[in-house]
Amino acid sequence: MTQPASGSPGEPRVPAVATLDLPALVSRLANGLTVVVSEDPAVPVFGMTVLYRVGSRLEPRGRSGFAHLFEHLMFEGTPGAPKGLFDRICESSGATNNGQTRPDATVYIESGLSSALERFLWLEADRMSCLSFEKETLDIQRDVVKEEIRVNVQNDPYGLFEYQELPALLFDKWENAHDGYGDFADLDAASIEDVKAFFQTFYRPNNAIVSIVSDRPAPEVIGLVEKYFGPLPPGILPAHPDISEPPRKTGAVSVREAPLARTPALVAGWRMPGPQNEDVLPLLILGELLHEGRSARLYKGLVEGRQIATEVMGGFNPFQGLCWYTGTTLFLSRIAYKRGVSHGTVLGAFAEERDRLLREGVPAAELERVKRRLFSSYLSLLENRLERSLELASATAFGGTPVAALEFPARISRVTSAEVVRAAEKWLSPETWAVVVKEPPAGAAEEEE
């Protein structure tokens, strides 16, 4: 079905975009497991996602990084499939597998020849039923996560500050503000009892979505999922905490030393509304308009124009993808800038670019260019069966239906310049930002010159 584009009177209309015509059959098993199957006969390959509705925002208080730690533990074997069997089956099948922890979900993904699909359904159902809860395994994976923190955070010149430090300054609630990678003391305090309780609470079929894209007939695939996952008992899920937060009324700027850095950088963030808010899609487009590519407003204004910055990146809901989240999320702008330039100058330049957008609006050609870039990247993503399975699972978990993913291009096509301006004025005020500034140690710049 083709959706007509809309716009303000006199505003050029963006060509209508059809809702994607991809089959997506949804079934719900008696134990509460949601199954999404998209049949694609082009090639005998499958992509599969098992999504659990638990991420870093639902890990126990005082156990920061626990959801991430648990993701690692899911690869450490079960009574029926000892450690190493999962990877051996994957390698012998010519398949790939991975996992990822997000703020609102943990996902496990596999892709390979369709002839291997059934064995991966058995593996995923097996580790949903029970894990090998051993202290030695916990100790090993605790050290693995610590090493990830050392490599990805402590060795990063700015300490991965947009992920590690900005949320604590931006949000009030612990669920939103704490370090999702993990604090060493919290990781050390995690026990086998914690692991068992977390598994029994969240890794239940009625808290999961299995999404599969393959060439096999959808009813047949649903039957296989029923065969392996159907016998698993549902769990009693806890009430989901209220993680929404009201808009900030004040701003905050924190200047900190970055011992490994040689040039300064800052990240500015804003609290964002819930996923049903009318400004969500305009904010997504605004993030692209400001940050993506050499034609982006901030690149042209701060890097090429004023020549005070060297790099800009950021956008809306950067840690979860598109609009799939719950409660609240953030919009951020990370800017690396030149020595000798003050962070006040950089923030002032950002505010000027925002004010110019409010005054002049977004020309139709620029808005269409941003939309087309979004469309192109999204369609490329859906061409990959593994990525499509993940997108359909995410849309089902946080949009209520896989159709939410298929309607995304048509919804984007209807966003107007006036809506983008309204979103920028309401949500990206300098008066409500939280800013973390990272400066190199005194003398660091002189050492390089």
Image: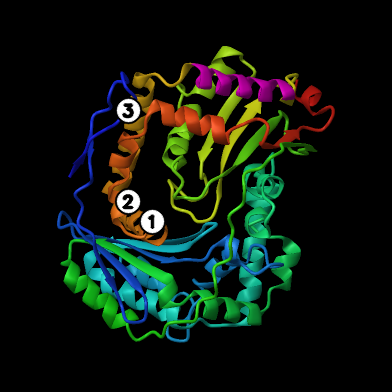
Tag 1 and tag 2, C-beta contact below 8 Å: yes
Dot 2: element: helix
Q: Earlier in the sequence, mark 1 or mark 2?
A: 1
Image coordinates of residue 90 in percent, x first then y, are 36, 68
Dot 3: element: loop
Question: In the rendered view of the protein, which quadrant contains the C terminus?
Answer: top right
Q: How many other residues sit within 10 Å of disc 2, few (<14), some (14-19) or many (≥20)?
A: many
Farthest residue in the front direction? Answer: 9
Residue 405, disc: 2
Question: Foreground residue, 111 or 390?
Answer: 390
In the image, which residues are magenta?
344-359
Image coordinates of residue 425 in percent, x first then y, are 55, 29
Residue 399, disc: 1
Q: Which residue is mark 3?
A: 7
Asked if the stretch drawn in magenta spans residue 259, the answer is no
The amino acid beneath tag 3 is Gly
In-image side of 439 versus 52 (left or right): right
* Residue name at image x 37 percent, y 29 percent: 416
Asked if the stretch drawn in magenta spans residue 348, the answer is yes
